Image: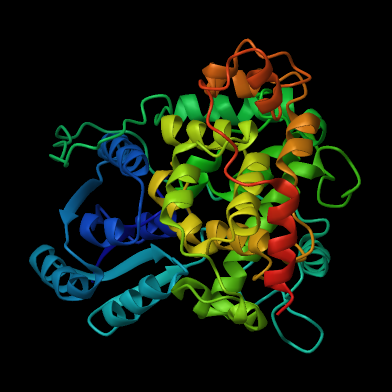
Amino acid sequence: MKTAFWFRRDLRVYGNEALIDAVNEGAQDALFFYCKSQWLQHNVASIQLDLLERRLIELGKQLNEFGITLHIIEADRFATLPALLENVCKEKGITRLYANKEYEVNEIARDDACSQRLELKLYDGDVIAKPGTVLTGSGEMFKVFTPFKKAWLKCFAGQHFHFPSWPLDKRKHAEFAEPDFFSATMESEKWPVDDNAIVAIVNRFIKDKLTDYKEDRDFPAIKGTSGLSPYLALGVVSPKQLIAQIQLHYPEVLENPSKAEFCWVNEIIWREFYRHLIVAFPKLCKGFNFNEKYNAVSWRDDNQAFERWCQGNTGYPIVDAAMRQLNKTGWMHNRLRMIVASFLTKHLLIDWRKGEAYFMSKLIDGDLASNNGGWQWAASTGCDAQPYFRIFNPITQSEKFDPDGSFIRTYVPELKNVPAKHIHFPHDYLNAFGGGDKYVAALVDHKEARARALDAFKV
């Protein structure tokens, strides 16, 4: 019986328990199926595909040093993958595959179909708590985050995470043949893909930024976030690995939620929450509102307004700077994601699904569960969502989180000479001093848009 490993979004060697078990069973082959047509249909961003390709090449070289060959096989769609997998395994004499689960509907159906053709042993390597294990007293999935978090923490109180050691020594092996990928339209070179650089990013965040994260995380002009989301999205690092690394410095981090260093761990638990939700409620993968009472909301079909939002031309500087950051870099600060999502769904009253799809088409850290959860939170249609009557004011958000306008000036250069006290909504100032033609007029009036949204959501 010959064993191999099937990589998905778990592109790591160390801390990959499923891979380690496969290697201990004698695996010398690893597979990765490159399903670009399937991914593009689901709006996977070009910059994320570029990061994926670069990491695969790095991973192939790394595995090669241990005598493991990574076979990267192009597949068209998930529907054709089971037959293709069966043929590949027959050709290579593989009878058993180890892999980490993916929790989206299409991926679950793919694995079910593959399991009918050969032995497929699946692990929960993308989460800390296996979906279905953090439940209410009546055995149901939580629909509100805070009680989920409390139950999650109770599961792991006093636990320190450790990983089995990598079982192989480096050996001489043939050179890894780099695959010939389709060229991406947006490069990811600013995000390193080698393990040493990524370990340095993790350590620098934990040592230098973790305790300040709570204070700095909402200010986009400050580099106060971890920068790890693209690596989590592709499984280059796992959430369990990150918690284990934090525990080296803060051993009781899971027992002290009031401590500053727990604030970032809380974001990991949010990530778990959204993954558990898509397993418990598969409709979330299919574009349905979690809260069905909001099916009655009448969204506006305004393509011109949507395009102005996409391009960062709404006339609200913090919104425009955020969208331009996304379009230019493939990433957006978390506070800004909430602001622009609220603006689209509440100020413009445009369906959250359009924003969700646009984000996925641009984000280097695009992730269905977290992206869907965040958009439905902002749109008030989701689980533990922002109440419909809470509508972010983009002007006061800008004043609070970019007080001197330094982030705005970075991405909206036409406002670079506007004084800080005017930059958050500069139209009166620009009109008075002859600069009104350089920056777009406001797409909507805040008070009028807020009243319209409240009226629409009363259903």
Which residue is depicted at the point 35% across and 52% down? 44
Q: Residue furthest top?
A: 417
Apparent side of residue 36 relative to residue 221 in the rendered image (left or right): left
| Screen quadrant of the N terminus | bottom left
- 171 relative to 387, above or below: above
Please identify the quarter of the rendering in which residue 222 is found.
top right
- State the image coordinates of residue 52 (x, y, percent, origin top left): 33, 43
Q: Residue furthest left?
A: 91
Q: Is residue 29 visible?
A: yes
- State the image coordinates of residue 60 (x, y, percent, origin top left): 26, 40
Which residue is depicted at the point 53% across and 74% down? 284
Please identify the quarter of the rendering in which residue 99 is found.
bottom left
Which residue is depicted at the point 54% across and 61% down? 350
- State the image coordinates of residue 243 (x, y, percent, origin top left): 68, 46
| Screen quadrant of the C terminus | bottom right
- State the image coordinates of residue 441 (x, y, percent, origin top left): 56, 34
